[in-house]
Amino acid sequence: MMPRASSPPDARTRARAALALALAGLAMTLAACKPQEGKACRTEARETCTGKTEALVCHDGKWERMACGGPAGCQKVGSNAQCDQSIASENDACNLPDDVVCAPDGHAMLECKRHRWVRTASCLGAGGCALSGKKVKCDNSVASVGEACSNAKDYACSSDHKVELVCKDGKFAVSSTCRGPKGCAVVEGGPGDTQGRRILCDDTRAQLNDPCNKAQSYTCDMDAKAIYVCHSGHYVLDEACKGRLNCRVLGAKVGCF
């Protein structure tokens, strides 16, 4: 029986080199197919998990990073991914147009617009911003001038409870000062806004040129020595109280007594 002929050493070397080259090419192909931030993608809005709290999402033909700050994080579901964004930060990437969530500090409501979370309302009231089931509740009964808001004619108190604010053109603006002893108060229950709250402004005292919202309504100055009237959105002098007479508010009547 003749011994089996062995392959020449140079042939075995060439075979190993070819196999290594093929494996390297396969690895490069797989790496090229794996989603990477900034690289091209084909399926718009597709998500893929890259970690427990992060994902990549396909927007406008490129992969971009998306935080999954909700308690469920990022989970793989078959060939797809579910990114929990029930808690998100302003300017983070998002993937559900017009969806709303709470900011991490619970003091703002964010809305998904053009693939970014945008602050649409401040929630500085006692209830803050809270997720109830699939609905977001925002207590904006306390706000600051210039803060974002979404419901026109929505009212709030300033943080020092001396000013009544109104939602105008997407931002809170001064509606009236509340210099009376009760200031600006948030009253729960009864007829009011969509969340059952009312804003009560004690405008029985004012300073000259203070903003006001009730045309031809009257009030007293801070020293109770003059009557002011609301004209063109500001309080102006109507009558000075003479001698020992003082300006007083008696029910619906304002006068020098």
Image (cartoon, rainbow, N blue to C red):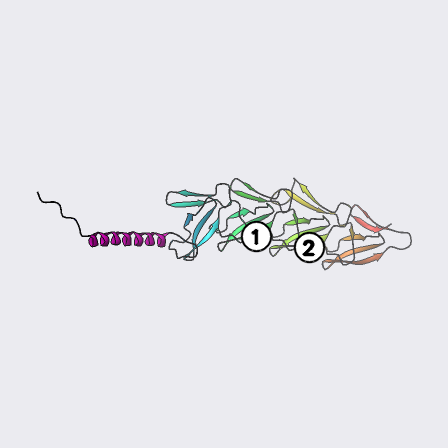
Name the one closer to the observer, 175 or 214. 175
Residue type at mark 1 is Arg
Residue 247, horizontal then vertical, whole percent: 84, 51
Q: Is residue 249 left or right of residue 29?
A: right
The disc label shown at residue 151, or none = none
Q: Which residue is mark 1?
A: 119
Front: mark 1 or 2: 1
Residue 200 lies in the magenta stretch: no
Q: CA distance from mark 1 to mark 2?
A: 20 Å
Mark 2: few/some/many CA within 10 Å (<14, 14-19, 20+): many
Residue 17 in the figure: left or right of residue 181: left
Residue found 47% across the figure and 47% down from its top: 54
The answer to which of 2 and 254 lies nearer the viewer is: 2
The three-letter amino acid code for the residue at tag 2 is Val
Magenta region: 8-34
Quarter residue 146 falls in? bottom right
Task: Please check the rendered image and state whether residue 14 is part of the magenta-colored stretch, yes or no.
Answer: yes
Q: Position of residue 238 (x, y in %)?
A: 81, 58
How many residues crowd mark 1 within 10 Å: few (<14), some (14–19), many (20+)? many
- 46, above or below 191, in the image: below
Could you tell me residue 194's position as x and y percent? 60, 44
Q: What residue lies at 33% left-to-right and 54% top-to-bottom?
A: 28
Determine which residue is flagged by label 2. 174
Magenta residues, dominant SS class: helix
Q: Position of residue 83 (x, y in %)?
A: 46, 45
Q: For the point 80% across and 58% down, which residue is it?
A: 237
Q: Nearer the viewer, residue 46 or 198?
A: 46
Q: Residue furthest left?
A: 1
Which residue is drawn at the image coordinates 32% and 54% (left, top)? 29
